[in-house]
Image: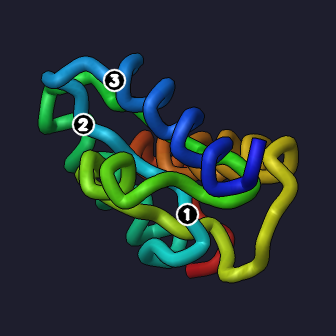
Amino acid sequence: MSPQDAKQAESEQILARIDASEQVVLLDERGQQMTSPALAARFAKWQADGRDLCCVIGGPDGVTEDCRSRADFVWSLSSLTLPHGLARVLFAEQLYRAWSLQSGHPYHRE
């Protein structure tokens, strides 16, 4: 399968699993980068929205434009290309940090 065909097939599988009511965050190197406090503020908005949050990490060649356009927010962990395993760890750590900041835990960078 060509990389383009693989990207198309994976994007179709991703879109098929996203419920119409979910808010979608796509992790993509071309997305918006944020500081930890900015992510904590965004995290609060996601929580206040009340919809389920669906976070998507595409394949090695990214996702199709259809999949990208379904995202409510496109977030870049880094402008570097990251292996998926590392992206998942960074993603989890940043969500934990955002939750910690929202919970009033002191932020060591301020």
- Structural distance between the alpha carbons of marks 1 and 3: 17 Å
Residue drawn at point x = 44 percent, y = 32 percent: 12
Type of colouring: rainbow
In this orientation, which residue lies closer to the viewer: 51 or 41?
A: 51
Residue 85: x, y in percent?
85, 42
Q: Is mark 3 on a helix, strand or loop?
A: loop
Q: Name the kind of residue labelled 2 in the image.
A: Gln
Residue drawn at point x = 21 percent, y = 49 percent: 45
- Structural distance between the alpha carbons of marks 2 and 3: 9 Å
- Structural distance between the alpha carbons of marks 2 and 1: 16 Å
Can you identify the residue that label 2 sits on?
23
Which dot marks residue 42?
Answer: none
Q: What element carries label 1?
A: strand
Q: Residues within 10 Å of mark 2 (few under 14, many from 20)?
A: many
Can you identify the residue that label 1 sits on?
28
Q: Is residue 34 visible?
A: no
Q: Name the kind of residue labelled 3 in the image.
A: Ile
Sequence order check: which comes first, mark 2 or mark 1? 2
In the picture, residue 24 is in which quadrant? top left
Q: Residues within 10 Å of mark 3 (few under 14, many from 20)?
A: some
Quarter of the image that includes the N terminus: top right
Sequence order check: which comes first, mark 1 or mark 3? 3
Can you identify the residue that label 3 sits on?
18
Residue drawn at point x = 55 percent, y = 69 percent: 76
Sequence order check: which comes first, mark 2 or mark 3? 3
Residue 34: x, y in percent?
48, 75
Residue 44: x, y in percent?
27, 47
In this orientation, which residue lies closer to the viewer: 94 or 54?
A: 54
Q: Name the kind of residue labelled 1 in the image.
A: Asp
